[in-house]
Image: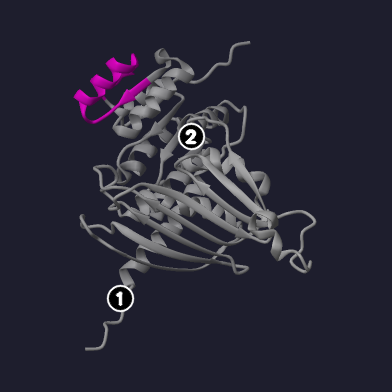
Amino acid sequence: MAREYPRMGVIGVGSLGFHHARILAELVGRENVTIFDVDADRAERVASELGVTRRETIAQLCDEVGAAVIAVPTVEHASVALQAIEKGVHVLIEKPLASSLEEADRILTAASARGVIVGTGHVERFNPALLACEPYLGVPRFIESHRLSPFGSRGLDVAVVLDLMIHDIDLVLGLARRPVATVDAAGIPILTPSVDIANARITFEGGAVANITASRVSRERMRKIRLFQDSGYLSLDLGAGTGEFLRLREGVTLASPDALALGLEGLVERIELVGERVEPLRAELQAFLKAVTGEGPLVVSGEDGRRALEVALQIVDRIKTHVPTPLPA
């Protein structure tokens, strides 16, 4: 029997929303995709290019779809999501889930009352490198991540913490698997009124520590995360979708008299990590479709999105209150 998907909507077809619409047209058929954007000319161009339907209002779109991706600016997430939820439409909301915890709670409360699914677009959960390292994951003692990007036009309506760093906040919360104990952070605006480069240090109950850096004013791109655990060392290049796991070779002990003569290569086993080459956004949408059709679990829930948002807002607050002591004259 052919799988039946609900008609899908995409609200907001800017640079990211376009790709959501493109992939959905391939997954469920272009005749089953409807889009909306406040820029009518943009919506018309995208509809023509992809061969999908467009509607002139969000209400019109929600009247004919069963689920929708919300890819509008963050400040509009709550108002748009609540319109869709009121119509009984399942939603996948691009990160961050909302611009405040109050808005996030309104979304989740409304969804619970209407019995609809809320997913959060933390696409790095579907990164091939992260999936490939799962068999080797232990309990990290220290996590370090760098997400650096050249300056561009996307995401400038919020601080870099809510635009870029929140990806790694979500990953770190999942990897640490412990409640957050303390948060410290520093950051500065460079080219915009908001913070453009930031560093946060998160300590978890049990003692694990994560050090996260994000920048949107860097000369080169970097998306890397490293994990130090008792069983070894994981280094993941999220940009390339690859990584490696380094651990002491079986049967080798440093107590052996000739251990040091083996050198690093003789002591350490290197396991290359290469995940399935699937576009992460496609994997994210496939997982969301399975969730709304009851074929699989919701991988990144609205509650997950709220947790990441809560820590991100704590980081933003710590940056505001972080004032270095001036050097002595």
Tag in front: 2 or 1 = 2
Q: In the image, is residue 37 part of the stretch drawn in magenta?
A: yes
Q: Residue at x 61, y 45 (%)?
A: 133
Q: Nearer the viewer, residue 256 or 12?
A: 256
Q: Position of residue 308 (x, y in %)?
A: 47, 53
Q: Residue at x 57, y 25 (%)?
A: 293
> Dot 2 surroundings within 10 Å: few (below 14), some, or many (20 or more)?
some
> Dot 1 surroundings within 10 Å: few (below 14), some, or many (20 or more)?
few
From the image, tell me which residue sits under label 1. Answer: 323
Q: Which mark is residue 280?
A: 2
> Label 2 vs label 1: CA separation?
39 Å
Q: Is residue 207 above or below residue 287?
A: below
188 left or right of 85? Answer: left
Q: Secondary structure at mark 1?
A: loop
Q: In the image, is residue 123 part of the stretch drawn in magenta?
A: no
51 left or right of 239? Answer: left
Looking at the rendered structure, the kind of residue marked 2 is Pro
- Give the magenta range: 34-56
Q: Position of residue 137 (x, y in %)?
A: 65, 51
Q: Residue at x 28, y 21 (%)?
A: 46
Q: Nearer the viewer, residue 323 or 297?
A: 323
Tell me if residue 300 can be seen: no
Looking at the rendered structure, the kind of residue marked 1 is Val
Q: Is residue 145 above or below residue 208?
A: above
Which part of the image, by quadrant, shows the N terminus? top right
